[in-house]
Amino acid sequence: MKMSLKELNDLINRKVNDRSYDLRGLDLSHANLSYAILTGFDLSGANLSDANLSMADLNKTKFIGANLIKANLMTFLMEADLSEADLRGAYLNNAFLNRANLSGANLNGADLSGTDLREALYDKDTKWPIGFNPKKAGAIHRVSQEELDKLIKTKIKDLSGFSLCYARLGKTNLSGADLSGTDLSGADLSGADLSGANLRGANLSGTNLSKANLSGADLLYTSLIETDLSGADLSGTNLCSRYLININFSKADLSGADLSNARLNKSNLSGANLRGANLRGTNPSEADLSKTPYDKDTKWPDGFNPKAAGAILKP
């Protein structure tokens, strides 16, 4: 359906209950939509070929399967859904596509000079301009479970910068693997061997790492929120100055771990091995320390009484 510019402008400017508008499948080819506020609109399947969307607000806008051939998109597209969109020859120079979804999108011939693609998602079906390296531009490769299973079978060790959220990796041998910057939120890594792995900057929020071996792993800048680390081997790891909010450390081995200056709000440390651990500068009174073993080498904050908190002195 071809919509006149007047009809379109009337629709864009109308605000009813602050809800998003459904513009799916409309023919807006050659339309001038510069400076339009289209945040949250659904333009999936729409024909926007040769349209001018420069300086429009397209944050969180849906363009699933849309025709954006040679469209002027020099604007803000943060968290926009461009999956399966046809972006051949589109003008995206200096555009902001942070955290946008580009899975299956065709960007052949698109101008990506100066484009901000940090944390934008793409997959094996995304087509890029010849010679363009999305990983170097900060985009994240979303890997399907099927692709991941094949990679694991080849014993590949470099999985850095991938999106592996909700992946099934229980009991997988990832010892020494490079998982830096990888999104593992919600993934199942229970019983996995991650000893010596590089997890620097990885997202482990909501990840199941119960009974995983993380001894010697690099956890610097790792996001750990509501992570299950029950029964995990974290001996000797560096968790200093970290926000360890609502973490399940029950029965984990934290012997010799550096937890200095970490925030332990609502974390469960019951039964965890804290022998030789450094908890100076932490707030252990906010955590569950019931039946938690420690020894004479465990370092507590000044004035803190571990016995009164339920911890048990054991050699």
Image (cartoon, grey):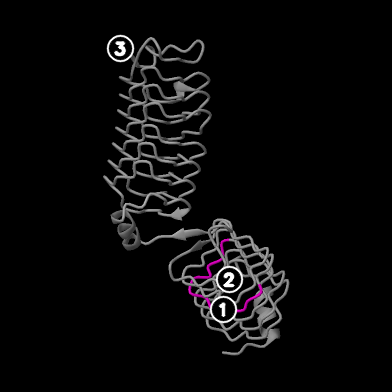
Mark 1 neighbour class, 10 Å CA radius: few under 14, some 14 to 19, many 20 or more: some
Let me know if residue 90 is in the magenta part. yes
Q: Nearer the viewer, residue 273 or 24?
A: 273
Look at the numbered disc 2 and give the secondary structure of its residue: loop
Query: Dot 3, crowdedness within 10 Å: few (<14), some or many (≥20)?
Result: few
Name the amino acid, label 3: Lys
Q: Nearer the N terminus, badge 3 or badge 2?
A: 2
Q: Position of residue 59 (x, y in %)?
A: 61, 64
Give the mark, 3 or 1, whose residue is nearer the N terminus.
1
- Numbered tag placed on residue 23 in the rendering: 1
- For the image, the number of numbered tags is 3
Q: Nearer the viewer, residue 224 or 268?
A: 224
Q: Amino acid at mark 2?
A: Phe
Q: Nearer the viewer, mark 3 or mark 1?
A: 3
Instruction: Work out whether 304 lies above or below 22.
Output: above
Q: Amino acid at mark 1?
A: Leu
- Circles 3 and 2: CB distance less than 8 Å? no
* Relative to 285, 231 lies left or right: left
**In the image, what residue occupies the spot 72% across and 74% down?**
34
Percent of width and height locating residue 300: 46, 15
Report which residue position mark 3 lands on.
314
Give the magenta range: 79-91
Give x and y (percent) for residue 312: 32, 14
Query: Which residue is under mark 2?
Result: 41
Q: Is residue 2 on the magenta stretch?
A: no
Cα distance in 3D space between marks 3 and 1: 67 Å
Q: Main secondary structure of the magenta part?
A: loop
